[in-house]
Image: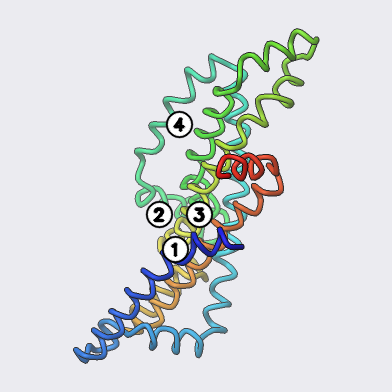
Amino acid sequence: MRPLLRSLWPPLLVLTVLLGGWQLYVTAAGVDPTTLPSPARVVEQGWLNRQDLWDQTLPTLQETLLGFALSFAAAWLVAVLLDFSSAARRGLYPLLVASQTIPIVAVAPLLIIWFGFGLLPKMLVVTLTTFFPLAANLAAGFAATDREAMRLLRSLGAGRWRTFRLVRVPSAMPYFFAGLRVSITYAVVGAVFAEYAGAEAGLGIYMQAQKSAFRTDLVFAAVAVTAALSIALFGATYLLERLVLPWERALKEDTSS
């Protein structure tokens, strides 16, 4: 608990100072709430409209989780294929890198045109946004496997799949979780952006509606909910890592001591 508190108090202190400065500026300058609402007003109006915010959060969370699940499965499939086939690695990896140069801002409207305003295009935007860091880090983790451990298992008669499962997958896990943390921070933003391109419900469409109604306070409230979702999912990756890699925590504690 103490290490957690030590890591949390600096950003919380900075956030408190920023919000306090924001509140003081808006109050002292008498800024119109439709231009820049105070943090207190954002919290107040967000609480008063909490049911609407919750109703719009659920579709965004669904799109995020389903899209990320698809990204997760695709990243593992592609990374394993790249690891097992040098031909696939030579043919696919440059295309994966090149895919990151395609702007999502151009792709998202096309997905809406092709697949409509339902769940699928939002899932695909989240998948496209989060896929590359997962696949690239997994592939790098597989490539970084200790060669001596590989040779030892093979000398004991282990086949390629058994060696992959017992050595290459565990060694790739730290790389995977590093990529997971990068990807998960993009997932909610990808879902919100997909909703901006076209949706029937969600935080993105809610922000658009409130912006058109000059309810800047509710736009900020929706942004705060989006940030809270991203932080919660980011924190969940550490809990998952503790469950999957309990030895990593022990190694870190031994190193720090």
Residue position for label 2: 109
What residue lies at 38% left-to-right and 88% top-to-bottom?
Answer: 41
| Residue 190 versus residue 203 in the image, above or below | above
Kindly check if marks 2 and 1 are in contact, taking CB atoms under 8 A apart as contact: yes
Of tags 3 and 1, the one toward the viewer is: 3
> In this rendering, would 245 be left or right of 157?
left
Place residue 147 in its image quadrant.
top right
The answer to which of marks 2 and 3 sits earlier in the sequence is 2
Q: Characterize the local packing of mark 1: few (<14), some (14-19) or many (20 or more) Cα atoms within 10 angstroms.
A: many
Of tags 2 and 4, the one toward the viewer is: 4
Residue position for label 1: 198
Residue position for label 4: 96
Identity, as a three-letter code, of the amino acid under mark 3: Ala
What is the C-alpha distance between the residues marked 2 and 1? 7 Å
The answer to which of marks 4 and 3 sits earlier in the sequence is 4
The quarter of the rendered structure image containing the C terminus is top right
Identity, as a three-letter code, of the amino acid under mark 2: Pro
* SS label for mark 2: helix
What residue lies at 74% left-to-right and 14% top-to-bottom?
Answer: 153
In this rendered view, identify the residue nearer to me: 48 or 181. 181
What is the C-alpha distance between the residues marked 2 and 4? 21 Å
Q: Characterize the local packing of mark 2: few (<14), some (14-19) or many (20 or more) Cα atoms within 10 angstroms.
A: some
Q: Characterize the local packing of mark 3: few (<14), some (14-19) or many (20 or more) Cα atoms within 10 angstroms.
A: many
* SS label for mark 4: helix
Q: Which mark is residue 7?
A: none
